Amino acid sequence: MAMVDEGLERKQILYNLLKSKDRAIVLLYLKTIYEYVTAKEISDATGIDYSNVVGALKGNGKRFKAERALVSTGLAICEETYDGGPNYYKISDKGMRYALFLEEHLQVQPMLDHATKKI
């Protein structure tokens, strides 16, 4: 099995976050609350359409590719419910490192303001 180049993976993840404002806002929102929440709660808090939140978290096969989603890249954790209830999401340690990088090195204050406007 070939080893993944960590520098390449890092660049791809940052590219994914910068390419999708919704993906970045969802990650930054998860950082601000640091607890498990549903996609609907994220949508309500950020004003991002529910389908776009789900796409950012897990992919939707259309606008958001699953391999670039926050869960599949390890930036968020999904706790699935098996009784038909909603899934719960939380930022991972890896996701926290990327969110801090975005805050420290890029101008993300407008994103943060948008992500926390309803909190």
Image (cartoon, rainbow, N blue to C red):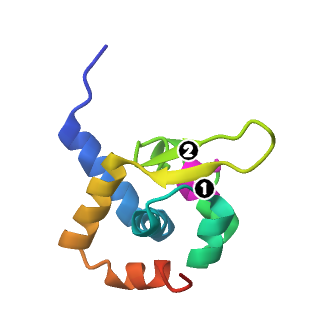
Identified at 64% across, 67% down, the residue is 41
- Determine which residue is flagged by label 2: 78
Image check: 4 left or right of 33? Answer: left
Badge 1 amino acid = Gly
Locate the N terminus by quadrant: top left
**x%, y% of residue 14?**
30, 56
Name, please, the residue furthest toward the right.
Answer: 84
Mark 1 surroundings: few (<14), some (14-19) or many (≥20) residues within 10 A = many
User: Is 68 colored magenta in this rendering?
Assistant: no
Residue on which disc 1 sits: 55
Give the camera-side residue of 64 and 41. 41
Residue 73 circle label:
none
* Residue visible at 47% across and 50% down in the picture: 70
The number of numbered badges drawn on the structure is 2
User: Residue 93's spot in the image, x, y percent?
Assistant: 33, 48
Foreground: disc 2 or disc 1: 2
Residue 107 x, y percent position in the rendering: 26, 79
Q: Which residues are magenta?
A: 54-61
